[in-house]
Image (spheres, rainbow, N blue to C red):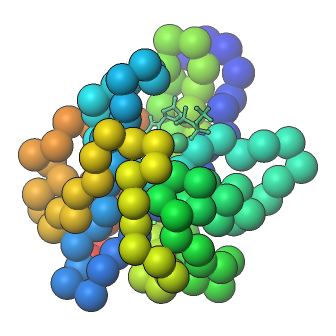
């Protein structure tokens, strides 16, 4: 374990068929090419829910509200330069059609198929939690 704790919030959007939205990290970013749950860093003075609502708007162009965000689990993982603490929420109700505004691709996948997509190491335990829930 090295460095500071980085607080990142992430969201599994779940559609009517119980599929989950994953997004591919673009070239030029760390872990480029890996598939992740949309989300990002919580800014100073921001609540996790407000940060997630902001990130969903910025990254996907969808809007939702705190009442539509349900906590599922969290990731706690040591990367080389920071320790990631990442609450994962599920959201089943939002407005707008998700668009890849900051990612190179989006994909709706069944929970059991998440294992077929390379994800950051921190996300591994979250897949099981989602499979249990959905
Ligand atoms: N959003 C997201 N980040 C993840 C996941 N798994 C994982 O290890 N991370 C890591 C990657 C990054 O080191 C960190 C935050 O992601 P990020 O750099 O895209 O943060 P951000 O959206 O605020 O983007 P930026 O403005 O800093 O570019 O969390 C995940 O499933 N979703
Ligand atoms: Mg992000």
Residue 128, position as x, y percentages in the image: 26, 57
Lateral position of residue 105 relative to residue 28, left or right: left
Lateral position of residue 3 relative to residue 74, left or right: right
Q: Confirm whether residue 81 shows in the render.
A: yes
Residue at 45 percent across and 23 percent down: it is 29
Q: Tell me: residue 87, above or below residue 95.
A: above
Residue at 64 percent across and 65 percent down: it is 53
Q: Confirm whether residue 123 shows in the render.
A: no
Name the residue nearer the viewer: 16 or 121.
Answer: 16
- Residue 107 sits in quarter: bottom left
Name the residue nearer the viewer: 61 or 15.
Answer: 61
Q: Tell me: residue 124, above or below residue 83.
A: below
Lateral position of residue 41 relative to residue 99, left or right: right
- Residue 22 sits in quarter: bottom left
Name the residue nearer the viewer: 19 or 72.
Answer: 19
- Residue 4 sits in quarter: top right
Residue at 39 percent across and 52 percent down: it is 100
Residue at 58 percent across and 44 percent down: it is 40
């Amino acid at each position: 374990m090295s460095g500071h704790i980085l607080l990142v919030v992430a969201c599994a959007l779940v559609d009517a068929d119980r599929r989950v939205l994953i997004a591919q990290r673009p070239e030029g970013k760390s872990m480029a090419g890996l598939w992740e749950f949309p989300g990002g860093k919580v800014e100073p003075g921001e609540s996790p829910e407000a940060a997630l609502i902001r990130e969903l708007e910025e990254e996907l162009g969808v809007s939702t509200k705190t009442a539509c965000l349900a906590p599922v689990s969290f990731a706690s993982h040591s990367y080389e330069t920071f320790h990631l603490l990442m609450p994962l929420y599920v959201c089943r109700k939002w407005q707008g059609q998700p668009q890849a505004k900051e990612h190179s691709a989006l994909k709706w996948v069944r929970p059991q198929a998440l294992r077929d997509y390379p994800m950051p190491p921190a996300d591994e335990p979250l897949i099981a939690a989602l499979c249990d829930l959905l």
